Amino acid sequence: MGAPDNNLVAATLRMDRGRLMAALIARLGDFQLAEDCLQDAVEAALIHWGRSGVPDNPQAWLLRVAQRKAIDRFRRDARSRAYAAELAALEREDDAMAVPHDIPDHRLRLIFTCCHPALERKTRVALTLRTLGGLTTDEIARAFLDKPATMAQRLSRARKKIQTAAIPFTIPDDANLPERVSSVLTVIYLIFNEGYAATEGDAQLRVDLCEEALFLARLMWQLCPDDAEVAGLLALILLTHARRAARMDDTGGYVPLKAQDRGIWDRAAIEEGRGLVEWALAQGRVGRFQLQAAIAALHGEAASAAATDWRQIVALYRLLARMSPEPVVRLNLALARAEVDGAGQALADVDHLEDALSAYQPFHAARAELLARLDHLGEAELAYARAISLTQVRSEQAFLRGQLALVQKKRPSSRLGRSPTGR
Amino acid sequence: MKYMALIYDAPVSRPDPTPGTPEFAAMMEPWEKLTQIYIDAGIMGGGEALMPVETATSVRVRGGKTETMDGPFAETKEQLGGFYILDCKDLDEALHYAAMIPVAETGTIEVRPVMDLG
């Protein structure tokens, strides 16, 4: 009887963990205590929701129970005198909370804490994903190719440092804002990526995380309305997210950009994104998110894959590669060049990236597609097989298997080829 | 919350000026200004400058036996030259004031919370 509710508790946490944590930290002033009390509340939910049914407002239920757990802890705690003020406020609040209400949104303060430069960069991303994205420690460990125990240790060290070094739970002052905003934007971008190309299980899209990133990007834009890169990131997320309905077919299969039904792209989101890109680029402080958004805008306004302004996309990727010469950016530049200078040139560029990207699924998928276009079918088969072995997302695996089958059909010598009419 | 700002810098080869000379006063001026800033802000919890590392002696006890060694604990390029105790509301405030220490531009300031044993 408890089993289906385990899923509901998990789903509630996935959506609202950040909001609940932020509300608890604002009230309790203690990151680890908030984490522990929320965990207590979750355990209570697993028992009560199975027995008495799911409450009307599960989030408010969890917050109220978590705060009661805090009251219990304060009362038990020998140091409770130090928390007398918090205890009194919590007790006053408990009665008021009997009526369902909106939970105040302190997530922006929380994201500045989680992205504080006193924490190691990898820790910032992991902590934000855990605290605001609501990912499990296992999922984060997988994203980083770490052991779950190692990641759990990293997260608990981070919470301890936040508490003992008194890393503040506030929006930074003007002098520190640019550096702190940049750190936050990188983290939001990574959260969006996590939602967009989920590392786990079945779904190509994890809409909740994408929406979470979109929400956080919008909050950042409200806070920093003069910052072109904030606008750039919001635009990038809007323009990419606008294509979500077209990225999956009716059976949940992955659909690449070229084959997507552009009629079901979210036009309002594309228009909003384009407007932001135009405003941002006019500020004359170009950044990597603005460039990526400009590329996404060009895709968004093209009536078809063939009508896409690939030359301008190549030019933008070149700027981007100069600004951040990461292998993945160079891979995308090579793929854009395929549309302008041909697959042969692109393949030569892509092959240069082998050392850096040999464990990266999209590298092998892209290489396979170029090889197939050039009729190097045997090599294309091998590259597809490698790509399939590198993804855990089933819809991607299915798509890649479909592509592999097409290549095998064209190739009579293949043992798996079914075509009797091969040349 | 109390923080200790530990001031690390590469030792200078030339000797420090003699107290009482105009050179000494010039050397001390930014430090006196800084200390006044800390006092005015109400965060000054103390601080000392240390004599150069050549004057350091390290001691440890191993198996009940006291071992005494000439020199600092770690022989590195940058050495602990002094410290401030800063009483700040959070790490951001402590980092803000620690960044004002003149040595921050040549060496490194390590900021650590002081353990509260109360």
Image (cartoon, rainbow, N blue to C red):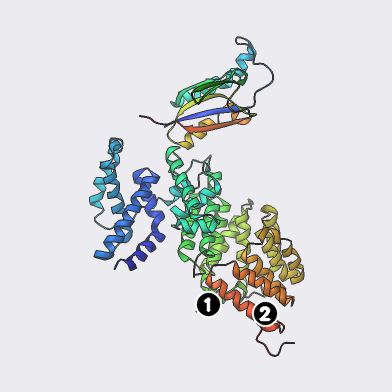
Check the residue under mark 2 and report the chain it is in. A
The answer to whether A145 is drawn above or below residue A201 in the figure is above
Query: Tag count in the figure?
Result: 2
- The disc placed on residue A249 is 1
Residue visible at 65% across and 29% down? B77
How far across and down, in percent of the image, does residue B14 sit? 69, 18
> Does residue B57 lie above or below A321 as drawn?
above
Relative horizontal placement of residue B47, taking residue A63 as reference (left or right): right
Task: Work out whether disc 1 and disc 2 sit on a shared chain.
Answer: yes
Relative depth, front residue between A163 and A287: A163
Q: Chain of mark 1?
A: A
Residue under label 2 = A407
Q: Given the current orientation, which residue lies at the most extreme bottom position?
A: A421
**Residue at the image position 63 percent from the left and 75 percent from the top:** A304
Whether residue A316 sits left or right of residue A182 in the image: it is right
Residue A168 place in picture, x, y as percent: 44, 41
Identify which amino acid the numbered label 2 is placed on: Val
Secondary structure state at the residue bearing disc 1: loop
Please tell me in which quadrant of the rendered image residue B20 appears: top right
Tell us which disc is closer to us: 1 or 2. Answer: 2
Categorize mark 1 by other alpha carbons within 10 Å: few (<14), some (14-19), many (20+): few
Q: Position of residue B99 (x, y in %)?
A: 55, 32
Quick check: marks 1 and 2 in contact, CB under 8 Å? no
- Residue A113's disc is none
Q: Return the x and y of residue A113 as percentages of the image width and height.
A: 46, 45
SS for dot 2: helix
